[in-house]
Amino acid sequence: MRAVLRKGWGPSVAVLALLALITLAGPWLAPYDPGAHDVDLGAVGPSAQHLLGTDNLGRDVLSRLLAGTRTALIGPVLIALGTTLLGTTLGLLAGYRRGWLDAVLMRLTDLMFALPGLLILIVVVGVAGGSYATAVLALIVLGAPADIRVIRSLALSQRELAYVDAARTLGLSGRRIMFRHLLPNLGPTVTANLLLSFVFALIALSGLSFLGIGLPAGTPDWGLMIAENRTILDLNPWAAVAPTLLITITAVAATILGDRVFERLSA
Amino acid sequence: MVFARVATRRLGAVVVLLLVLSVLTYGLLALAPGGPEQALLGERASTPETRAAIRLQYHLDEPFPVRYWYWLSGALGGDFGNSVYFRQPVLSVIGERLPVTTTLAGFAIVLTLAVGIPAGLAAGLRRGSAIDRGVTFGTLVSLAFPPFGIALILLYTFGVALRWLPIYGSDQVANYVLPAIALALGQAAVVVRQTRAAALDVGGQDYVTFARARGLSRLRVWGSYSLRNAALPVMTVAGLLAAANLTGAVFVEQAFSLPGLGSLLVQAVNQKDIPLVQALVLLGGAVVIAVNLLVDLLYMVIDPRVRHGAAA
Amino acid sequence: MTADLPAGLPADPSDELPPGVLLSVRGLGVGLGGRPIVDGVDLTVGAGETVGLVGESGSGKSLTARAVAGLLPPGLTATGSIRLAAPAGRPGPPVELAGAPERVLRKIRGRRIGLLMQDPFAMLNPLLTAGAHLAETLPRPARGEVTQRLAEVGITDPDVARRYPFQLSGGMRQRVAIAAALAGDPELLIADEPTTALDATIQHEIMQLLARIQAARGMAVLLITHDLRVAFELCDRVQVMYAGRVLETGSAKALATGPSHPYTLGLINALPAVERTAVRLEGIPGSVPRAADVAGQCAFAERCAQRRDDCLTARPPLRPAGAGRLTACLHEVVPRPVASAPEGPAAAAREPSAQPLLLVEGLRKQYGTAVALAGVDLRIEPGERLGLVGESGSGKTTLARCLLGLTEPSGGRITFQPPGTPRHRVVQCVFQDPSTSLNPAMPVGATLAEASGRAAPGERRPPGELLELVGLPAAYATLRPHRLSGGEKQRVAIARALAVRPELLICDEPTASLDVSVQAHILELLRTVSAELGTALLFVTHDLAVVRQITDRIVVLLHGRVVESGPTAAVLDSPDHDYTRRLVASVPPAPALTGRDACTS
């Protein structure tokens, strides 16, 4: 733990740990019911009752922020795990085994890279009347090609190294070579991918809800809060600025952590 | 000649890609809730007559490949049908919004390159210096900034708190300053990282040392050795960013309420205006594919290895 | 040519250089953030003289060369004095290059000092044609001058000027690079391992070309090389570097016949000779220290058999040791006689048997239209040591990979005895590059345990025992590969291959990326384990001197075909095929120490 702090990971780890805690304990921490509104009160700035003020419908911004941690974090965590698992497995298989699987995967990823991904995400989730779950699934599918490509090209270059030839000469199984020999050497990249996917998913998911896609209106969600409250910047700027800052801080913390972990592991 | 063969192969791949994209796009209609008939009807009264007219107009009684063919041949001729919401031809709706998006995209890409390339070079040439560490950390942070977040903070700071720039509108240059900055910040970070990596890579190459060892002038070593070789990867990134901006900087347009293609798409999606969505997706895909092709061709001009088919 | 230069004597930087001296380096130091890498190097090059700077990896020879050209990698700084005589015909004080501004250096580079680097694949700008490289470097390119300059380096095809580097072979690229380096007609050419990346026959051609141009132009050459034989063959004077300093300098002939520093002697003893088989290959124990760790003592003391107490108390100065010779050893060097083995009893004993260990019949391999193997027949008897000799593109590595099952042959048959044993228990391999042949993520012990687990149930040995077999302490089992030196990694790789007790050990250029003193150890180890365990060897190499030391019989491969085979000594002493003759001729002669010939049978 001391090593972690010395390497300048401290703030990043602290931010992410705090957020994880809030995700679990959110409902007990919130001073108000995030859905409870008070139309007569309307949007007012920070006060002793409402630390971050209220929104147009008089809902407590702080309570909504705490409740919003769920959609903000759970989806991106699932997406990060999903894309990394999918990308690492398929990338390893394609890079080590080559053959038809590799050919098919490469054509598929070529196709996905040539298409406007964000557009497709918006359209698929939007038109299909998509839910949060559709958005999570769509983001896993959209995010995997980049991971597949990165892992595959690393697996390809590792495969040319003599230690893989030596393992094959010993008659070891393909699965053992892929997961016991190649994978540990790709560790830094896999970890970095995981955190990068998290950031990508966090921004994309909250972006979708900012556009009003994926989550029903009124859900306490950071992206949705920005969209709903950007018209009351003059009355209570915190209603929109606070969720913006939270998304940004989370994303920056995860990015820095990814960068540091990659440098540390590959040293 | 090899050049022609390579170029032809690329063009062939482009046609295939466009066809795949068009099938996917057309398939969207089937995804729409209530089926294609309901989607195309929109807000209009649902009577047996109107439904029959829609079925006839869009060939909904024909099998899928035939329907697709009618749609595709229309689209190739510029006829994407009528927007369900605007009740006018899709292409003219898009035409009205296009200038906003191109202005923003042009503004942003100029800003991106003007900031990104010098910063990347400065960092790459002084590896490990305070400048390098500062720039690298800066890009790390900017990359993690959500574009709508930047937009909102800029809007609040310069539009609401300081009142330096207008918040709404799309007809003055001043309307585009904040959106272009919001768009360029994250993109410049990408360009900085790419330029820095390219400068580091090229700077460490033997051929640069060998050029200096032959007493070539600084200008020559820079122009014909470092920059030319470093330009290749930077070009690719710049092309992709330009393409992304042209298909509509959705978040930024939405955040600043700019009536460009991005906010048009969000509107069309929310209103389930399928013909409009189809046209936007197909055009967006075409732009991405065209820019990719352009970058590939530029590669061929600059790099003899690609031109002679020796490298992918 | 210029035999009696006062090399190594302290000089006042303001002095004129003695007549005939072109370059004078005094007290050169190169450091990385205060830590010295090159420490107090003196170097003198006379006009028209060829000087060899010889050393193993980590000796600081390349950095010395780079410092002279003013092209040290970023982060490294040079101290001391580097003086270049005033241009011929314009007498004046010498130019000080150390610490000179870029503006001064740029005028010197190319026009007075040229630099040729190691890797012809990386030295040329991939975006420029061969002709453009020359044209941009020529001070005033006249019509037809590019063609003329290319002709000087033996390129007569005018088409080459229009080609891009990727369209040229390695040898061609190095010729173009030489022409470009010489375009400004420098008085001194620094050639930093100019042929290391090339095939033996091409190496020989390029070296001959350099010698020819040097003679024709009367240009001085500073040749940086790890290969003592090359230095002795081409240079007037040779300077031996070790751990960032000079240990010995003198005429090539004097050094080759009677070195006056134990390190030089050790290097010469470690050299394999194509002309004879040594009874025992003598490496130098230990490894090269860092310059910073041996600043106040003899740098070689830790590894020296003649060490006395005074070697460790102070840094020995370079002292005169005969005409034009200097040594940094306080003591007289005692040469040890090295005996040659009587040739061939082992080879003679192994008549073709009915049951060869390995039988290869008509083996073919094609990649698209390119033919890598065009029908190769081969047999190896149990316990036999066979050399497979060829240059890049000969198909030797493809053949080895087919035998190992790493590459699927296009046709032909491979039969191992006894039939039915899994291939991995019959044949194992030691790969070329020790830096990649061990999994960096696995401790050495885990690598060995995994290999051992693939042996037949009764023959599994613990990692510690395997390490001891190859002369490493059992405690190495807990280390990860990055903690080991190149030679140690290769020992672990040998242990891994032997863990399954194979009948046949394929060695694919196992010493090609090792220093000569380490190479001797590895070759000796392979000879020992092969004899003790009765393991047959298939030794794949391009190095005829190495193959002479370790094999009974050789097979010469050219363009995927066997062009010659027979007992090693017989083939190398009197080659039949024209190609084999060229290969043998391209090996520089090994130095014959005085007193060594007497022991040769």
Image (cartoon, rainbow, N blue to C red):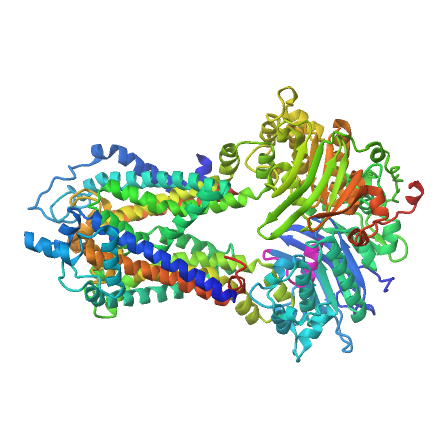
Q: Residue at x 64, y 49 (%)?
A: C372
The image position of residue C97, as x and y in percent, is 69, 66
Look at the image and say whether residue C522 sits in the magenta stretch: no
Q: Quadrant of the N terminus of chain C?
A: bottom right
The foreground one among B251 and A10 is B251
The image position of residue C40, as x and y in percent, is 73, 54
Q: Quadrant of the C terminus of chain C?
A: top right
Q: In the rendered image, is residue C91 in sight?
A: yes
The image position of residue C84, as x and y in percent, is 74, 68
B108 displayed left or right of C48? left
**Rendered image quadrant of residue C476:** top right
Query: In the rendered image of this protein, does residue B250 appear above or below residue C382?
Result: below
User: Given the current orientation, which residue lies at the most extreme top position?
Assistant: C458
Q: Residue at x 87, y 58 (%)?
A: C324
Q: In the rendered image, is residue B186 in sight?
A: no
The foreground one among C423 and C276 is C423
The image position of residue A252, as x and y in percent, is 35, 47
The foreground one among C32 and C421 is C421
The foreground one among C567 and C467 is C567
**Rendered image quadrant of residue C239:** bottom right
B55 displayed left or right of C89? left
Q: Residue at x 66, y 36 (%)?
A: C414
Which residue range is magenta in the image?
A: C61-75
**Rendered image quadrant of residue B191:** bottom left
Query: In the rendered image of this protein, does residue C10 appear above or below residue C514?
Result: below
User: Given the current orientation, which residue lies at the most extreme bottom position?
Assistant: C143
C28 displayed left or right of C124? right
Q: Main secondary structure of the magenta part?
A: helix
